[in-house]
Amino acid sequence: MKKLFMKGVKHGLPIGLGYLSVSFAFGAQCTGSGLTVLQALLISMTNLTSAGQLAGLSVMVSGAALQTGLIEMALTQFIINLRYALMGLSLSQKLGLTMNTPRRMFFSFANTDEIFAVAASQPEKLHHHYLYGLMVMPYIGWSLGTLLGAAAGAILPVFVTNALGIAIYGMFIAIVIPPARREKPIAVVALIAIAISVAFRYLPGLNTVSGGFVVIICAVVAAAIGALLFPVRENAADSKEVEA
Amino acid sequence: MTLTWPTYFIYLAVMAGVTYLIRMLPLTVFRREIRSVFIKSFLHYVPYAVLAAMTIPAVLESTGDVRTAAAGTLVAVVMAWRGHGLLTVAIAACCAVAAAQGLLMLI
């Protein structure tokens, strides 16, 4: 079914373009932190996730002892990427009959926020040709952007790399604000997380805790408070909207 | 500091492995809905808590100058509030930082 595949490729194009600029910033940050171009590219090609990679990079270059660093890496990736588990659960309800176990295992690699959002918004059950097509442009965009950013980041003037440094945070802000506007509990959870994060950055004693663990603590505490104060009765994943 | 290749590969394997398993297992193994309201709610809020904590205060140190970073953040928040997409908001934030840098050079 070439038609379904091409439909997926088309739907993935805007995602791929968006990834190009964000991963360019990530690549520049990698080489800026001391990684080689190839090391930066391999992270993007094997992970395909923005927030997790950014946190992973900081653990990698933190200079921590390997054992501590690896535990921190595993915990950080687990907490930061936990949202994908929810998306995976949600999407598994929408998969068509052709999505057998090996095909699920293959596609799940590329289940990013944006790919999930586009796939979940399709009216019909999802065919594997469509999902495979949907993976193509985001994967190319994410990898190519990282390669270019890592290679060019070093030769770009500081003026430009400074400006690009904020790109990935701009994307995070664009993911959080619209749902926080619609659902007050999300705004409350985000503000709690910010308060804890700021405390860990600036309060003496607390500011010695490394970044990866701070994210974990913020996420677990804020999300648990949110879950206790504002339990979600309907299918949470269905009401989640991530804009591509 | 430079990262040696063996160390890098161990980190990469843990990083990619954990990320992949979190994505793969629920999509492949679980085919039923979670019943616990608390776990469902917790998972619903996790992404926003993570992104908010990762953004603030780190964003203020992302451009090498807290003033240009604040300008970029403000523009990003306003654009996102108005409902613009990820790409538009990210580019607008970069442009705001560039403009603020230019402005500071003139002062």
Image (spheres, coloured by chain):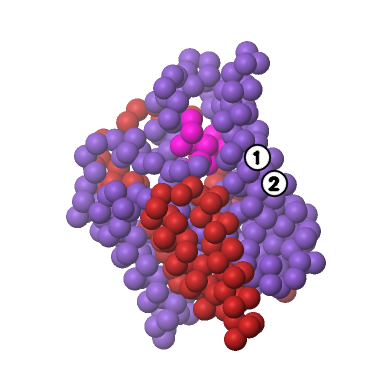
Chain colours: A purple, B red
Q: Where is residue A30 in the image (x, y as percent from the top left)?
A: 68, 62
Q: Where is residue A111 in the image (x, y as percent from the top left)?
A: 53, 37
**Element assignment for label 1:** helix
Few, some or many residues within 10 Å of mark 1 (<14, 14–19, 20+) = many
* Image point (46%, 37%), residue name: A117
Judging by the rendered image, the residue that carries numbered circle 2 is A143
The kind of residue on which mark 1 rests is: Tyr
**Element assignment for label 2:** helix
The kind of residue on which mark 2 rests is: Ser
Quadrant holding the N terminus of chain A: top right
Residue B53, quarter of picture: bottom left
State which chain disc 2 sits on: A
Judging by the rendered image, the residue that carries numbered circle 1 is A139
Is A195 left, or right, of A59 in this rendering? left
Q: Magenta includes A148?
A: no
* Image point (61%, 69%), residue name: B98
Q: Where is residue A161 in the image (x, y as percent from the top left)?
A: 68, 67
Position above or below: A144 against A123:
below
State which chain disc 1 sits on: A
Main SS, magenta region, reads: helix
Is A193 left, or right, of B93 in this rendering? left
- Please report contact status of discs 1 and 2: CB closer than 8 Å, yes or no: yes
| Range covered by the magenta-colored residues | A105-119
Which mark is drawn over residue A156? none
Task: Decide which of A94, A224 is in the foreground and name it.
Answer: A94
